């Protein structure tokens, strides 16, 4: 504790993921992971009359489902860490209003789910909570309105553009459980390499991912091949390729184990999403709908999850400012000690 | 035959004006909004120096339908108003010349806003 | 990451996939041309009716604006535009779409502060700069008339 040079936090009492669920829109349901998601709405409205309310409702449904999947009494939940892409995090505030639980509203753009998981697990490990939830969401329609153009505006998307996922993921973490456990976390630093192209966010965020990965491998002495899967959140096609190439230049070959949530969520050619998915809900739904289920069923034992966020606003973009990126790291392991014994 | 020929002229000139804008979109960092602003201003200037009128007589709607034509209507309206009313026409003419287009856009836009709701993109 | 900003920017730019220029241009030319030819056909049609030439010429863009706003409401304009690019953006149809799409979208914020206030967020600059240049042109034209 208190060593300014060490960024990796090895949790003393690793909490267990006990319940997890994802709710998605139609396009995400039609993607390669479609059947693994717990709930989808083909209109994307989730029965609401505005897109902002739809997103809140999707987040509420995801948390409810995660609680019931984990057979958790909602009353036993002690805190919720949540965030989304909307101004002032309103999707989370309205979506979680009805739970009546202590609420931490977070903004980390697409990295929010890792930030929420990290803070929830650290608080549990430190003994402040027995049970806490990490939730995040994004909705294509509400995000498009806030960050880009009206839904019916006729424009062409750049080949490097990413698609904001309509998805929400919720994860219940508990002091006790059968795993998967969160054994290590590492908060990211803000990295800016001068990319100001909103249509190439993968390139804007990749340097943050590379910084976090290199720091983690250097501090822990681990190698990429110690993991069954290294998963960045939402770098998309471009960011994924940049990260792979530049990590190799740094001496870390991740070819065998590296994938990206934005690439997993959609079928690349058929769904016309250009460079893949993005948004807080993208990696949240992939982790809660696909990865944790796979870990619980024995498919993977050690997963390094690294959610990246692009920390710009519509005004900062108009002012020509470069897009700062951040990458928060969460190590999911089936082994509570966090040692990668079998790799 | 004249009818067919007028369509072909409109097609060729209108298509070319759009094609130039597409090259600007793909090859420069210009956003669509900037290109539209450029086109409308350029339309006023080209009309002012007498270069756009010949294109309109040649291609008809091929020259008036693209946003350059919006600039053409603005400039023509201003010129007519200045001729009739003097300097005050510089302020009144532009919007007079384009009144139908702006009013139609506002009216139909409002009307359809009442009827329809946005759809998620495919 | 031991790469300075400039090197990184160049690296990113060099590897990014490019827009398919030839295909985009062909689509823009085709659709833009067809819209203009359709406008011309409308004009010729209106002229056969009992209508002054000036009214016919006014009615053509009004019809196009109506159709573009309708397609926007039905949710098909953006699908055509994805194919056509500048082909639907540059004709008056793009202007109509730029007005109708925020109006439809922002209905959720109310009829005054939503539809009313947001309607010209995208098309506004076109009108502002159009008026600006036309006023300057009018002033120059007036001076020119004084001198002659």
Image: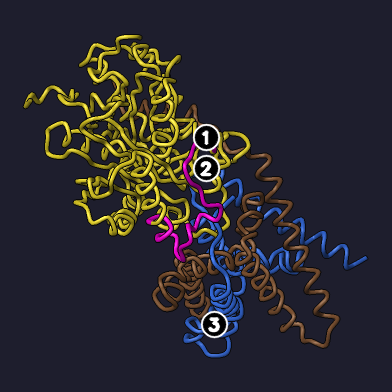
Chain colours: A yellow, B blue, C brown
Separation of disc 3 and disc 2 at Cα? 52 Å
Residue A72 lies in magenta, yes or no? no
Q: Which residue sits at x=18%, y=25%?
A: A11
Tags 3 and 2 both on a single chain: no
Farthest residue, direction bottom: B85
Left or right of residue A258: residue A107: left
Quick one: label 3, few (<14), some, or many (20+) residues within 10 Å? Answer: many
Q: How many marks?
A: 3
Farthest residue, direction left: A2
Q: Could you say where residue A129 lies in the image, as x and y percent from the top left?
A: 16, 40
Q: Which residue sits at x=58%, y=65%?
A: C97
Circles 1 and 2 in contact, beta carbons < 8 Å: yes
Residue at the disc numbered 1: A33
Q: Secondary structure at mark 2?
A: helix
Number of the label disc, if any, that sits on residue A195: none
Residue at the disc numbered 2: A28
Residue A85 to residue C51: above or below: above
Q: Quadrant of the C terminus of chain A?
A: top left
Separation of disc 1 and disc 2 at Cα? 8 Å
Circles 1 and 3 in contact, beta carbons < 8 Å: no
Tags 1 and 2 both on a single chain: yes
Depth-wise, is mark 3 or mark 2 nearer the camera? 2
Residue at the disc numbered 3: B93
Q: Could you say where residue C79 lies in the image, as x and y percent from the top left?
A: 64, 54
Chain of the residue where label 2 is placed in the rendered structure = A
Residue A50 lies in magenta, yes or no? yes
């Amino acid at each position: 504790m208190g060593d300014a040079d060490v960024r990796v936090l090895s949790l003393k009492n690793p909490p267990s993921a006990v319940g997890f669920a994802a709710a998605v829109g139609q396009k995400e349901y039609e993607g390669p992971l479609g059947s693994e998601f717990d709930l989808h709405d083909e209109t994307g409205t989730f029965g609401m009359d505005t897109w902002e309310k739809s997103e809140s409702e999707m987040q509420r449904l995801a948390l409810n489902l995660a609680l019931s999947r984990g057979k958790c009494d909602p009353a036993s939940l002690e805190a919720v860490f949540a965030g989304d892409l909307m101004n002032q995090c309103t999707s989370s505030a309205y979506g979680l209003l009805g739970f009546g639980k202590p609420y931490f509203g977070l903004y980390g753009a697409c990295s929010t789910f890792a930030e929420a998981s990290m803070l929830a697990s650290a608080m549990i490990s430190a003994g402040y909570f027995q049970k806490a939830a990490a939730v995040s969401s994004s909705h294509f329609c509400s995000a498009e309105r806030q960050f880009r153009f009206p839904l019916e505006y006729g424009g062409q998307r750049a080949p490097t553009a990413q698609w904001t996922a309509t998805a929400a993921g919720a994860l219940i973490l508990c002091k006790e459980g059968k795993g998967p456990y969160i054994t290590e976390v590492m908060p990211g630093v803000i990295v800016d390499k001068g990319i100001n192209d909103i249509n190439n966010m993968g390139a804007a965020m990749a340097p943050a991912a590379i910084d976090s990965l290199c720091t983690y491998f250097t501090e822990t002495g681990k190698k990429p091949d110690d993991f069954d899967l290294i998963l960045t959140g939402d770098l998309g096609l471009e960011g994924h390729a940049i990260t792979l190439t530049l990590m190799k230049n740094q001496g870390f070959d991740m070819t065998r184990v590296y994938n990206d949530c934005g690439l997993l969520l959609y079928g690349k050619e058929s769904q016309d999403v250009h460079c893949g998915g993005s948004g807080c809900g993208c990696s949240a739904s992939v982790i809660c709908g696909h990865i944790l289920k796979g870990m619980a069923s024995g498919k993977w034992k050690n997963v390094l999850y690294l959610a990246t966020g692009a920390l710009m606003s519509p005004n900062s973009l108009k002012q020509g400012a470069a897009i700062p990126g951040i990458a928060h790291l969460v190590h999911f392991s089936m082994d509570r000690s966090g040692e990668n014994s079998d790799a | 035959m004249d009818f067919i020929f007028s369509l072909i002229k409109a097609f060729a000139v209108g298509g070319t004006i759009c094609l130039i804008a597409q090259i600007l979109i793909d090859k420069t960092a210009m956003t669509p909004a900037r290109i539209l602003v450029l086109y409308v201003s350029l339309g006023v200037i080209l009309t002012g120096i007498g270069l756009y009128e010949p294109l309109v007589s040649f291609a008809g709607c091929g020259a008036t339908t693209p946003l350059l034509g919006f600039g053409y209507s603005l400039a023509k309206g201003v010129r007519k108003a200045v001729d009739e009313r003097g300097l005050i026409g510089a302020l009144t003419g532009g919007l007079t010349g384009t009144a139908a287009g702006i009013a139609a856009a506002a009216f139909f836009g409002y009307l359809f806003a009442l009827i329809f709701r946005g759809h998620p993109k495919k | 990451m031991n790469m300075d900003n400039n090197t990184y920017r160049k690296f990113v730019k060099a590897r990014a996939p490019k827009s398919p220029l030839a295909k985009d241009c062909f689509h823009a030319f085709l659709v833009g041309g067809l819209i203009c030819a359709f406008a011309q056909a409308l004009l010729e049609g209106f002229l056969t009716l009992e209508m002054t030439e000036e009214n016919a010429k006014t009615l053509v863009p009004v019809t196009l604006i109506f159709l573009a706003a309708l397609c926007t409401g039905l949710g098909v304009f953006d699908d055509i535009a994805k194919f056509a690019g500048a082909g639907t953006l540059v004709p008056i149809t793009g202007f109509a779409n730029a007005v109708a799409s925020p109006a439809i979208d922002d209905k959720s914020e109310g009829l005054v502060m939503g539809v009313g206030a947001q309607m010209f967020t995208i098309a506004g600059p076109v009108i502002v700069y159009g008026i600006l240049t036309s006023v300057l042109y009018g002033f120059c034209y007036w001076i020119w008339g004084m001198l002659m």
